[in-house]
């Protein structure tokens, strides 16, 4: 299985959760974890990820925050399984609220977030999550950035709905992520197995 980890906004290919996932999976010869840097315009990130998905077999996604938003779109496009960690729901609106007067915002040496990026994010939003039965959504009520209830409503409204796990307390960064890796890995392996049967 090839797991692509999609990091969040203002993160990078060396994110804490991505690195933890890669280290955990290193003991399994049949599991490779890929950590692309997604500091680029949204449509460019989606294109890069789509090409990566199409170039490999048995692909699964793990996406955090903005990476979870991207993963939702990619599941609909490529029918791959995904685990979403405190996924962003309307990132164009959130970024407008947080950074409006600072736009264009230097996020990374190679990328400035601007109005065109916000429009691209809005284009990627799906009214209803597709293939949601291929998704495990991990939410923590203590998320200080996003309202977990919005994601809970969105992914549970899909038909069939996503599998949701909501914990009290926690944070946007997903407290105790390392302890959740065996669970998310089993979910993804089970999804891949179903596809190959």
Image (cartoon, rainbow, N blue to C red):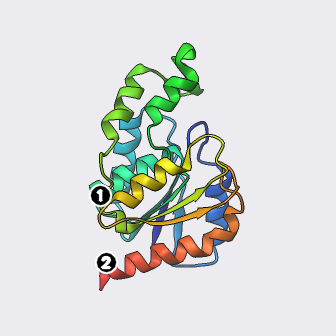
Helix, strand or loop under label 2: helix
Earlier residue among tags 2 and 1: 1
Residue 98 % position (x, y): 58, 25
The mark lying in front, picked from 2 and 1, is 1
| Up/down of 42 relative to 139, above or below | above
Helix, strand or loop under label 1: loop
Q: Which residue carries the number 1 mark?
A: 130
Q: Quadrant of residue 166?
A: bottom right
Residue 120 % position (x, y): 35, 31
> Which dot marks residue 195?
2
Q: Which residue is rendered at x = 70% and y = 55% of the image?
A: 170
- Considering depth in this image, is 48 or 125 the residue closer to the camera? 125
Q: Which residue is rendered at x = 52% and y = 36% of the image?
A: 39
Q: Is residue 81 visible?
A: yes
Q: Quadrant of residue 10?
A: top right
Q: Is residue 117 left or right of residue 130?
A: right
Q: Is residue 7 visible?
A: no
Q: Residues within 10 Å of mark 2 (few under 14, many from 20)?
A: few
């Amino acid at each position: 299985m090839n797991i692509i980890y999609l990091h969040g906004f203002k993160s990078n290919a060396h994110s804490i959760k991505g690195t933890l996932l890669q280290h955990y999976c290193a003991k399994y010869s049949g599991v490779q974890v890929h950590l692309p840097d997604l500091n680029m315009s949204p449509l460019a990130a989606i294109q890069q990820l789509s090409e990566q998905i199409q170039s490999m077999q048995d692909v699964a996604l793990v996406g955090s925050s903005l990476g979870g938003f991207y993963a939702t779109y990619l599941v609909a496009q490529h029918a791959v399984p995904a685990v979403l960690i405190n996924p962003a729901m309307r990132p164009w609106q959130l970024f407008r609220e947080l950074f409006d007067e600072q736009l264009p915002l230097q996020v990374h040496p190679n990328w400035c977030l601007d109005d065109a990026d916000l429009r691209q994010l809005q284009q990627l939003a799906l009214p209803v999550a597709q293939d949601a039965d291929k998704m495990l959504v991990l939410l923590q009520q203590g998320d200080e950035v996003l309202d977990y209830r919005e994601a809970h409503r969105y992914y549970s409204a899909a038909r069939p709905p996503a599998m949701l796990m909501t914990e009290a307390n926690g944070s946007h960064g997903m407290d105790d992520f390392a302890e959740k890796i065996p669970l998310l890995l089993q979910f993804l392996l089970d999804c891949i197995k179903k596809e190959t049967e």
